[in-house]
Amino acid sequence: MRSVRALILNTHDGKLFTELDRNVIFKVKIGNGTHQKVEDKGTITIETNLSFKLISNVLYVPEINQNLLSVSQLLDRGYKMLFEDKSCVIEDAEGTKVFNIQMKGKSFVLDF
């Protein structure tokens, strides 16, 4: 199982976590400009096209209704994204494809 340490994710689904740090207390600003309470931070395991990956530092934000990736934080950590033909390919700093996400409506939905 490959560990993806720098992928920034906010999720509303507490069942995704394999471990949690319940001592996290702060708020995050989401795309619509509101601030939402972060209840926990931890690690989740997700299945990609090629394997299972561990994602650490995932924020548990129960008041949002979807899982959110931060594009700016991904770029800051060396990830590459290509938006083309109604899809988004995300590669890590070594050039390994992490996700290929298809556009649904006007969003790129990453379901776990």
Image: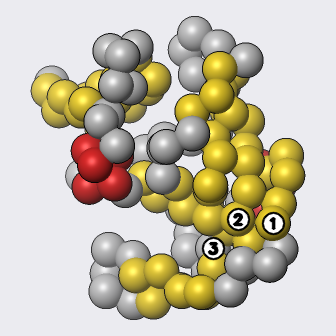
- Look at the image and tell me in which quarter the N terminus lies: top right
Q: Is residue 26 visible?
A: yes
Q: Position of residue 41 (x, y in %)?
A: 70, 65
Looking at the picture, how far across and down is residue 31, in whole percent? 32, 74
Residue flagged by tag 3: what amino acid is it? Val
- Residue 88 appears in the figure: no
Q: Residue at x 39, y 76 (%)?
A: 30
Point out the image quarter for the C terminus.
Answer: top right
Q: Residues within 10 Å of mark 3 (few under 14, many from 20)?
A: many
Q: Which residue is mark 2?
A: 41
Mark earlier in primary sequence (2, 1): 1
Q: Nearer the viewer, residue 25 or 31?
A: 25
Left or right: 26 in relation to 74:
right
- Residue bearing the label numbered 1: 21
Residue 93: quarter of image:
top left
Figure check: 100 above or below 72: above
Q: Is residue 46 above or below residue 61?
A: above
Looking at the rendered structure, the secondary structure element under dot 2 is strand
In the image, 45 versus 4, the foreground residue is: 4
Q: Which label number is shown at residue 61?
A: 3
In the rendered view, would you say 29 is above or below 89? below
